[in-house]
Image (cartoon, grey):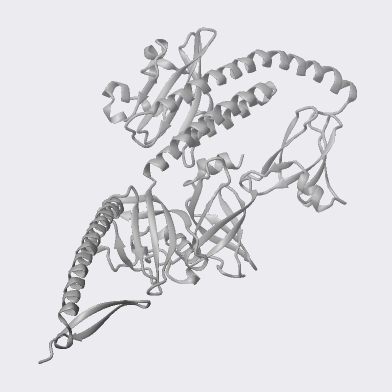
Amino acid sequence: MPQFVYVRENTDKGIKWKTIDLSTQSLDDISSLINSYYVNQIELEKQNKELKTNNDKLNGLFLNYSYLYENAPFGCFTLDMNGLIVGVNSTVLKLLSIEKDKIINKPLQIFIANDDIVVFYMLRSKAISSNTTQVGEIKFKKKDGLLPVQINCMRIDDSKDNLKKIMVTVFDFTEVMKARVAISSRYEFEKIIATLSRKLIASPFENIDEVINASLQNIGIFSGVDRVYISMFSNNMEILTITHEWCAKDISPLMPHVNKISVNKFFPFLEKIKRLETIQIPNILNMPLEEKLNLGIFHIDDLKSFVITPLIYSKNIVGVIGCDSKAARKNWSQDLINLIKISGDIFTSGIMRNKEQGKEHIEEIEEILITDFEEVGIPEDNWKFEKKTNIDAESIELLPKAFVKKDNTVIISCSQCMRQKIITTNEINGLGNILYIMCPCNYSFDIKLEYRRSYRKTINLDGVFIRLPPENVKIIASTEEDWGRIRIENISIKGIGFTTPQPNMLMTGERCKVKFTLNDELRSVIDVRAVVRGVRDNYIGCEFIEGDKYSKILGFYLK
């Protein structure tokens, strides 16, 4: 009766199995066959042992890599080509404070701040098309606010299954943003001090008040307060007069009213000032009642907090410098107090120099008025204004500018004799905006009248716009028509001008979000809403809706 067994046979093409009928084999053949089975068994056991060892190693590596993936210091999303989340690590869940089942199979963009969806679309699109890692900065939504992150997008190709996925890694940028703010604050702090010192040293005494007022504005914008002022004592510290003041928009100045007023009537901190103390009140609600009674005389309406520090000159207290704020604070930062103190010292030197040199200058001017003008017979106010003709466009751009104020007045300054003349636009009506001017000192010059309310800087930066729907409608940026790349061409405190790849991508009156990075030292990100005021082919002119959002950053950038 036939008895079949399977025998392994090694060939050039690999292992091959065949059947043998034992009833046809001799005892020697059967013995040899049994021996080969024994050898094969040993080889199989050895191979199994090796396989188990390698499998254990692979499992160990898998566990290690899984642990590294799950607990990486950055979040990892795996997306399919439609943008749906098919995998995340534990770091993502911790960063967003969310459960895994509430994020899987959801589109990633629903977890991104509305204003940054377009940035994510651009990064993902470029990563897919170019197969290169794309890096950007966006914000994710969280239950308790927004999370700033750096995002990296890359395409992953699986050649075996011909599948494509997108790996998105995110790094928590909270501390980076705090550091940027701190560095920006320190940089602006030092810039204010350096600029103030340089200008006061270089300025003639008659321009010192102008320099001080501009510097008070810089301090106000930098610190986010509503009013910055300097007040000087007289009559043995019994009388106080506000000499210089800057107020934010919609804040009424006190300077015309607080003039030679008795200190004892409304200034309860005189003794502390005499002891050279800095008075800082983070919240006036915590002040004693007797100290709050007359605050309205010396401070702005709706005051919530303020800081005051003495001004010293030649070891004498000559005045105070202070800031008012309509917002309560936890405290006044030491950096801000240091800025006020240092600026106050510089201001005091300039003011006192102004007083000392002013007396000499008045005597000198009186001498000139009595001699030169009487002899020559030219009145001091005899300025001549004519329309400038025959001037090319390139030369016009090089002309000094005189800005027309809201009340339609403009200050004309002669660089030769330092005279100034305030005129109204009615006086030069019909002369155009390029003027030829003859000063009473017989020095002539050309100027360009600038009717813009703020300085506009020419730039060349990349950015994006996001079309915004009408107010009270939810923002959705999900189609190519909702956003586009732009080239920023100019910017001012109040608005921006840019070009688009195709004409008429936005219409006059539409609202949009504009986002780009300045080419300043801190690479400041501007992300602001605007309304379209003018369209000319590819050029779009916009006015900022959030006028004060970036006033500090742009104020320093435009200088």
Residue 395 % position (x, y): 81, 48
- Tell me the residue at 37%/24% (across/down): 280
- Tell me the residue at 48%/18% (across/down): 240
**Quarter of the image that includes the C terminus:** top right
**Quarter of the image that includes the N terminus:** bottom left
Total marks shown come to 0
Q: Which of 264 and 98 is in front in this view?
A: 98
Residue at the extreme left of the image, as rendered: 1
Quarter assignment of residue 375: top right
Residue 20 % position (x, y): 20, 85
Residue 480 visible to an observer of this rendering: yes
- Tell me the residue at 38%/53% (across/down): 170
Q: Which of 327 and 407 is in front in this view?
A: 327
Q: In this view, does 449 lie above or below 330?
A: below
Q: In this view, does 526 lie to the left or right of 160?
A: right
Quarter assignment of residue 103: bottom left
Q: Is residue 1 left or right of residue 423?
A: left
Q: In this view, does 532 lie above or below 503?
A: above
Residue at the extreme bottom of the image, as rendered: 1
Q: Which of 543 and 146 is in front in this view?
A: 146
Q: Which of 78 and 346 is in front in this view?
A: 78
Residue 428 visible to an observer of this rendering: no
Residue 498 % position (x, y): 60, 59
Residue 70 % position (x, y): 27, 53
